[in-house]
């Protein structure tokens, strides 16, 4: 607070208790509003980050069951590679394969690098992309989840 000189005397006039209280309330309310805004922003950012991080992976059967509701929408699907379904186009990086949940299958196209363990029959494959009206899942991201336990390869006699 700055000191204010009273023009009628040489004494320094200090703010009255009422003026002091009003200033203090104004500063406290500004501080409270700033803290509340900060908390709201942090909560919003945390919520949106958590929501995208915990996005649900649908099974192949769920995608097929929902049909029209999931066409041309961003989805996450998981399953396992269908044995002998992998094909690579001769002059490009585009690949075609199918994934299954054990009952149903979806055809997939992908134009990128295949991750390690992609061809392991025990690996779970998680895809992010869009399911087209033609019944093909066009993925732009493949994540391979390692098997949860060691599976020894059986030796043939």
Image: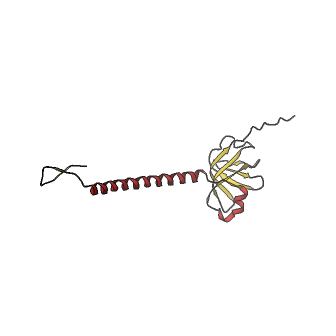
Residue 62 position, x and y percent, is 71, 59
Q: Nearer the viewer, residue 146 or 133?
A: 146
* Picture residue at 69% right of the left edge, 63% below the top: 66
Q: Does 155 sit above or below residue 95?
A: above
Evaluate whether residue 92 shows in this view: no
Q: Nearer the viewer, residue 38 or 89?
A: 38
Residue 61 position, x and y percent, is 73, 57
* Picture residue at 67% right of the left edge, 47% below the top: 90
Q: Does 149 sit above or below residue 125?
A: above
Outermost residue, right side: 157
**Is 47 left or right of 21, judged from the image as shown?**
right
Q: Nearer the viewer, residue 99 or 1?
A: 1
**Is 40 left or right of 65, judged from the image as shown?**
left
Total number of numbered discs in the rendering: 0
Q: What colour scheme was applied to this rendering of the protein?
A: secondary structure
* Picture residue at 63% right of the left edge, 44% below the top: 113
Q: Tell me the quadrant of the picture where the C terminus can be found.
A: top right
The image quarter containing residue 136 is: bottom right
Residue 18 position, x and y percent, is 28, 57
Q: Does 2 sit above or below residue 69?
A: above
Residue 75 position, x and y percent, is 63, 56
Evaluate whether residue 52 shows in this view: yes
**Is 33 left or right of 118, judged from the image as shown?**
left
* Picture residue at 72% right of the left edge, 62% below the top: 65
């Amino acid at each position: 607070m700055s000191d204010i000189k009273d023009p009628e005397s040489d004494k320094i006039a200090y703010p009255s208790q009422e003026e002091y209280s009003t200033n203090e309330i104004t500063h406290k309310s500004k501080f409270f509003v700033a803290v509340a805004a900060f908390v709201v922003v942090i909560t919003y950012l945390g919520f949106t980050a958590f929501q995208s991080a915990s996005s649900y992976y649908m099974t192949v059967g769920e995608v097929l069951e929902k049909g029209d509701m999931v066409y041309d929408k961003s989805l996450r699907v998981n399953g396992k590679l269908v044995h002998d379904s992998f094909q690579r186009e001769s002059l490009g990086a585009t690949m075609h394969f199918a994934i299954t949940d054990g009952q149903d299958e979806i055809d997939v196209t992908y134009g990128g690098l295949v991750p390690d363990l992609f061809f392991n029959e025990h690996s779970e494959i998680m895809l992010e992309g869009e399911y087209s009206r033609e019944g093909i899942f066009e993925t732009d991201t493949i994540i391979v989840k390692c098997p949860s336990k060691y599976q020894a390869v059986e030796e043939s006699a």
